[in-house]
Amino acid sequence: MKNLLLFIVLLFPLFVHCQTEDQKELKQRKTLIWHDEFDYQGLPDPKKWNFEEGLVRNNEPQYYTKERIENARVADGCLIITAIKEEYRGCRYTSASINTKGKFEFTGGRVEVRAKLPEGRGVWPAIWTLGANIDRVSWPMCGEIDIMEYWGHDPHAIYANVHTADYNHTKGTGRGGKIVCEKPWKKFHIFALEWYPDRLDFFMDDTLYYSCKKKGEGIGEWPFTAPQYLLINLALIPGQPGIDDSIFPVDFVVDYVRFYKFE
């Protein structure tokens, strides 16, 4: 028995080392297949991005404008999404939401976004995905992956969330995690999702802070065998705790968006 225990003790570091090396090798075996470096001027590239328009979801108070440079522009090497307090088509605020639906959709791989968050009570920037089949099966059956969610009234926390038909916030069964970061709006951070067949891993900079593992309960639990598309938006939080009108205009700044396919 002592010899067996000794063998296990000696073998374990080798096993961990092999796992670590395998993980490193996997991360090295990735290919950049889609990206936007925002190295141009004007509106976001229409070959890569769509605009949402209107009062879109969640009873949010902002009106998402379409191709309005005051709310979404590319300048100085960045995408800048600006929320403004103004009267516009019956709403008190405007902002922008862009997505890659029908232009770039993916299954698996690594999504990486370098961004600087807005500051202030009421802001709700997000980097997230929805199932490309949403028009056919609707939400939440299509699946939703929130790579980064930030609520201005909770200023030192970054959240990741996963919604499916069986596991979502409307049922009180949502899955997610968070990472604490002091004043995350002070500088750029890298927010990333690594999508594997058996799990979704969420990162802030180099820190893995949440992993959503496949339970094997069927499509209601895991619709993530089908393509998703990417969304980037700056929403405002409806209801309480309210919006601080003194913060406007406020910017959500994105340095780049990159998608890597694992080989």
Image: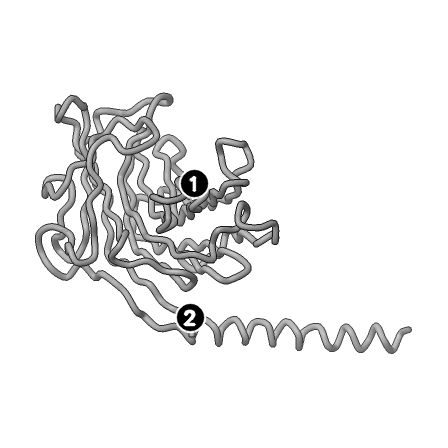
Q: In the current view of this chain or complex, which residue is farthest to the right?
A: 1
Alpha carbon separation for disc pair 2 and 1: 29 Å
Find residue 165 and report its horizontal and vertical position in percent: 50, 41
Amino acid type assigned to the residue bearing label 2 in the image: Phe
* Local secondary structure at mark 1: strand
| Direction front: furthest residue | 136
Which image quarter: residue 102? Answer: bottom left
Q: Which residue is mark 1?
A: 157
Label 2 vs label 1, nearer the camera: 2
Q: Earlier in the sequence, mark 2 or mark 1?
A: 1
- Whole-percent x, y for residue 210 in the image: 51, 51
- Dots 2, 1 in contact, CB < 8 A: no
Residue nearer the viewer, 165 or 145: 165
Q: Residues within 10 Å of mark 1 (few under 14, many from 20)?
A: some
- Callout 1 amino acid: Ala
Q: From the top left corner, tell me how far across and down residue 92 is, in percent.
A: 18, 23
Position of the C terminus by quadrant: bottom left
Q: Is residue 168 left or right of residue 239?
A: right
Q: Where residue 40 appears, x then y in whole percent?
A: 11, 59
Of 34 and 12, nearer the camera is 34
Q: Can you tell which quarter of the image residue 120 is in?
A: top left
Q: Is residue 221 above or below residue 19?
A: above
Q: How many marks?
A: 2
Question: Label 2, on which residue?
Answer: 262
Q: Is residue 92 left or right of residue 127?
A: left
